Amino acid sequence: MAAPANESLSAVLRQWLGATPTVDNIQRVSGGASRETWLFDAHVDGVTYPLVMRRDPAANNSQTDRSTEYQLLAAAAAAGVAVPSVRVMLAPADGLGDGFIMDRVEGETIPRKILRDDVYSNARATLTAQCATSLAAIHSVPLASLPKLAHQDARIQIKQWQSFLDGFGEPHPGFELGLRWMSERIPETVGDPKLVHGDFRNGNFIVGPDGLRAVLDWELAHLGDPIEDLGWLCVRAWRFGNTDKPAGGFGSITELLDNYESAGGRRPSDDELRFWIALGTVKWGGICMMQAFTHLNGMVRSVELAAIGRRVAENEWDLLKIIDGEC
Amino acid sequence: MQDRPNAHELVEAVREFLERDVMTATSGRIAFHTRVAVNVLAMVERELQLGAQHDVDQRARLQAIFNQDGSTRELEIKLAAAIRNGELNTEQHAAAVAHIRASVKEKLEVANPKYLNQ
């Protein structure tokens, strides 16, 4: 899609700001290959509002639509989770696509910078605890405050990822081996289902020199086992080479679990956590395939998406290690 | 038979052009996608070098598991289904695990050899 027109953005902000703003500095953020993120500024009476528009470029291929994401952000904010404040839900008549506008939280989202740059060394020291606390808060969001979300427990997800992989028609015996291993080790359900973020990992939160500032990318949110989020954060892909720091590339599993527990979360057993790391590894493999096929089927032609298809093998490799007892 | 440069050498020439000329002349999204394109071409170079032997080896291992002829792809599909449905005997299962380890390693030798040392 072409860049949004200044006039369209300006018109859609009128109701929230109570006046028609001027809009400038519209720019697209690189990355975020499956949807578009645009940054821009709105100005009214000498005040600048730094904003973000998130929208789908073409047919929606993610689990939740943008309106659900908008409602989720509102519910998470009410429960004390650090998220950008949502401002405007776009309507078809606005001519801007399917999406919404929220505040722009300043900071870094590029994982390698967060994990390597000196300016984030203090942030790295607190990130594990902050992630654990945020996850405990997400898992305590009252279900009554949420939009309608699918319930996806471990058993459902194994079946779901099997059929998801089948949809591409490409054989992956490594994933099959892992899924079989998992189906023999399904954790027992403990307590009621909780809000699960579904994509809580480095790259999907905004970090400043002070640490975690906002949790983004709620499009995979669902109801289920909260330990899924802890496992996903520990999937090897999110370590970005920091293999000695399994919690997100910045911490230890013990530090993550200790902080999660003291923030009110339920501490999982090693086997439970390992199960969800394994499932997360299949899930990331599946998402890599989906991204490659977004290119292959012509929906969005992109060398970046094409290249991601060859990262699937990294996940099969990781899964084989997990089966062998490594985390 | 084609004249030189061969396929590998042509891909190499394009990769070098992207690295030497395009990367240095661009910034932002274009520079990022150029870096991705350079990595993709390096991958194709490794596949041109290693792919044929990998296929021979993978096919031989799969044929041994099923004691049956077929292409690598046909037998790989059969293997994936057999694992899902629990149709392998103990001996086949052990051979399948060894094959999968070797095959995934071979895929990474093409896609991202550095990953094997992480």
Image (tube, coloured by chain):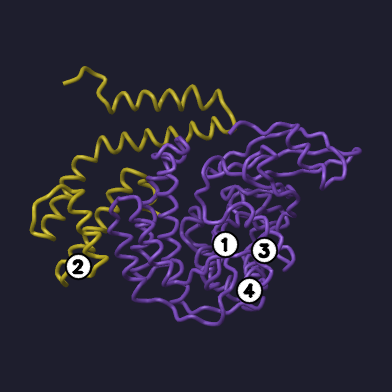
Chain colours: A purple, B yellow
Rendering coords of residue B37 (x, y %): 44, 33
State the residue at coordinates (44%, 35%).
Answer: A303
The kind of residue tagged 1 is Ala
Marks 3 and 2, how far apart in space? 45 Å
Q: Nearer the viewer, residue A188 or A281?
A: A188
Of the numbered discs 4 and 3, the one sitting upstream in the chain is 3
In the rendered view, does A165 fall on the left or right side of B91?
Answer: right
Q: Is residue B90 above or below residue A82?
A: below
State the residue at coordinates (59%, 41%).
Answer: A36
Both on one chain, marks 2 and 4?
Answer: no
Q: Residues within 10 Å of mark 4 (few under 14, many from 20)?
A: many
**Circle 1 SS class:** loop
Q: Chain of mark 3?
A: A
Of the numbered discs 1 and 4, the one sitting upstream in the chain is 1
| Residue highlighted by disc 3 | A126
Residue A186 is drawn in which quadrant? bottom left
| Residue highlighted by disc 4 | A259
The image's mark for residue A221 is: 1
**Circle 2 SS class:** helix
| Residue highlighted by disc 2 | B93
Rendering coords of residue A35 (x, y %): 56, 44
Q: Chain of mark 2?
A: B
Marks 1 and 4, how far apart in space? 22 Å
In the rendered view, does A272 fall on the left or right side of A127?
Answer: left
Of the numbered discs 1 and 3, the one sitting upstream in the chain is 3
The kind of residue tagged 3 is Thr
Residue B45 is drawn in which quadrant? top left
Q: Nearer the viewer, residue A66 or A243?
A: A66
